[in-house]
Amino acid sequence: MTGFRTLLYKEILRFWKVSFQTVGAPVLTSVLYLMIFSHVLDKHVQVFDGVPYTSFLVPGLVMMSILQNAFANSSSSLIQSKITGNLVFVLLPPISYREFYAAYVLASMFRGAFVGLGVALASLIFVTLPLAAPGWILAFALVGGGILGSLGVVAGIWAEKFDQLAGFQNFLIMPLTMLSGVFYSIHSLPDVWQTVSHFNPFFYMIDGFRYGFFGQSDVSPWRSLGIVVVCFAFVAGLTLNLLSRGYKLRG
């Protein structure tokens, strides 16, 4: 397990050394979202009974930060290593593809968790958040971070240049995240868009995570957790398959 621990340490150190950019900047962006949307909508929108809109918004922003930064960590690390040519130094040591996968995904989960915690702490300046079911918060944060960390590995393997990776993020990850109910309840949407939202796995991550704070959600948290776990199993299986074949990694 020495190779796994070393690779995990290297990946955590990679983002922590520039934490002002990788942690501080996303926290600031989410706080700006919170300030703008709460100022404009707080007195005009109420989604759950007894829950101010600003409070409703915070868990969505926290989870969005976890997901986006988990994806960014593994995808950016792999594409940088491929372009600079130093990926060979990771592939040459006797590290199994399972250890490779675990190190990259766990490091991504760490980064997502750090950013999410930073957003949650910064939001306490504006709101007081209840903790109705902390276990659900932890479960969805971990599984959601694992899914996006795995997707980041897939994107990093597939992409051969930065614009391809940007396309993956801008045309897949960003729309799925922004249309997942971060800023609204899907019950406020027309029927057709409510139906479409139920095919978005990011919706279940956000909704289940929010349930952990308020004990209220658009769908059952058990249903959300089941769907999210199935998605994680599928993405993890796909990623491990690509790694085992050395797809676009080994000549």
Image (cartoon, rainbow, N blue to C red):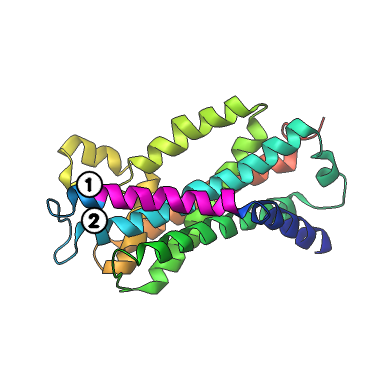
Which amino acid, mark 2? Answer: Asp
Q: Is residue 219 left or right of residue 121?
A: left
Q: Is residue 202 left or right of residue 148?
A: left
Residue 140, given in percent of the width and then of the height, sits at 43, 61
In this rendering, does residue 153 appear at all?
Answer: no
> Residue 212 lies in what quarter of the image?
bottom left
Earlier sequence position, callout 1 versus callout 2: 1
Report if the CB atoms under discs 1 and 2 are less than 8 Å apart: yes
Q: Nearer the viewer, residue 234 or 248?
A: 248
Judge whether 250 appears above or below 65 on screen: above
Label 2 crowd bin: few (<14), some (14–19), many (20+), radius 10 Å: some
Q: Residue at x 74, y 34 (%)?
A: 82
In this rendering, does residue 178 appear at all?
Answer: yes
C-alpha gap between disc 1 and disc 2? 7 Å
Which amino acid, mark 1? Answer: Ile
Residue behind mark 2: 218
Residue 203, given in percent of the width and then of the height, sits at 34, 48
Disc 2, SS = loop
> Residue 174 lies in what quarter of the image?
top left
Q: Nearer the viewer, residue 54 or 225?
A: 54
Figure label count: 2
Q: Does the segment drawn in magenta span residue 15?
A: no
Judge whether 204 appears above or below 166 on screen: below
Residue behind mark 1: 186
Q: Does the segment drawn in magenta span residue 21?
A: yes
Q: Residue at x 79, y 52 (%)?
A: 96
Q: Main SS type for the magenta part?
A: helix
Q: Nearer the viewer, residue 19 or 78?
A: 19
Give the residue at the far right of this rendering.
Answer: 93
Residue 242, given in percent of the width and then of the height, sits at 67, 39
Residue 152, given in percent of the width and then of the height, sits at 58, 42
Boundaries of the magenta span: 20-37
